[in-house]
Every structure is written in C-alpha cells, then in structure tokens.
Image (cartoon, rainbow, N blue to C red):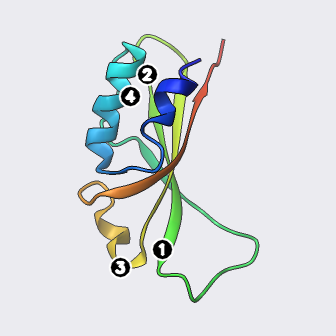
Amino acid sequence: MHEQDFNILEGRSITLPELGKELENITGRQIKDSTGEIKRVVAHLPNFESDTDTFVATYRLDHQNDLIDATFTAPKSERNRLKEVAVNVELISYITKA
C-alpha cells in the first residue's frame, strides 16, 4: 500500500518516535503510540558474536484496525533504551485487518 514511501525509511538510522511521525506523514493517519509496541525477534540460531539484536515495533493506526510493523536492529547494550536511541530500520510492512 505504501511500500514505495516506506522504502525511503528502510536502511535509515532513526529514533522510534521519529519513525512514528514519518509513518503518520506517509499514511495520513495518526499513530496511537509514538514508539509502537516493541518485541524482540528471536532467531533459531543465536549469534553470540553479534553486538546487535533484532526487534519489531508494531504501530497501531487510530480509527482503523491496520498495523505497521517496523523491523529494526539496535545494539545489545541499548536494549533498555530503545525508545530513546537511534535504531537501524530494516523493513517496514503495512498490515491490513479488514
């Protein structure tokens, strides 16, 4: 639906509140929570040598059942500060729940 616009955000380093504002601008809809609901993605084979973890922030849109998932990586050392630090956006997906 908004894939071309989301593409310009992928690969960027940005804070989750800034990402929420960008998603509002792209979709024309208001986000319920500026940082989304954050969940860690657990890999089948852990990579102990990596200094980053992968997460998904789910942004819920007001007045719709639609969601936006933003997959991102962040340093393991910043795990407790994900809502404050810049993260690396890997993939953004628009999910329609009609």
Question: Can you give x and y, in whole percent of width and height, for residue 63 in the image?
Answer: 43, 10
The residue pinned by badge 4 equals 23
Q: Do we see residue 31 in this rendering? A: no
The residue pinned by badge 1 equals 52
How far is mark 4 from mark 1, CA to CA?
24 Å
User: Residue 61: which numbered mark, if any?
Assistant: 2
Q: Give the structural element (helix, strand or loop) at label 2.
A: loop
Q: Is residue 77 left or right of residue 90?
A: left
10 Å crowding of disc 4: few (<14), some (14-19), many (20+): many
Q: Name which of mark 4 and mark 1 comes first in the sequence.
A: 4
Question: Can you give x and y, in whole percent of width and height, for residue 79 in the image?
Answer: 38, 70
The residue pinned by badge 3 equals 77
Question: Can you give x and y, in whole percent of width and height, for residue 89 in the image?
Answer: 45, 50
Q: Amino acid at mark 1?
A: Thr
| Residue drawn where x is 26% and y is 60% of the image | 85
Q: Are marks 2 and 3 in contact (CB under 8 Å)?
A: no
10 Å crowding of disc 2: few (<14), some (14-19), many (20+): some
Q: Do we see residue 50 in this rendering? A: yes
Q: Is residue 66 left or right of residue 11?
A: right
Q: Name which of mark 2 and mark 3 comes first in the sequence.
A: 2
| Residue drawn where x is 23% and y is 57% of the image | 84
Q: Residue furthest bottom?
A: 49
10 Å crowding of disc 1: few (<14), some (14-19), many (20+): some
Q: Give the structural element (helix, strand or loop) at label 4.
A: helix
Q: Residue furthest right?
A: 44
Question: Can you give x and y, in whole percent of width and height, for residue 32 in the image?
Answer: 35, 27
Q: Amino acid at mark 4?
A: Leu
Figure check: 70 above or below 4: below
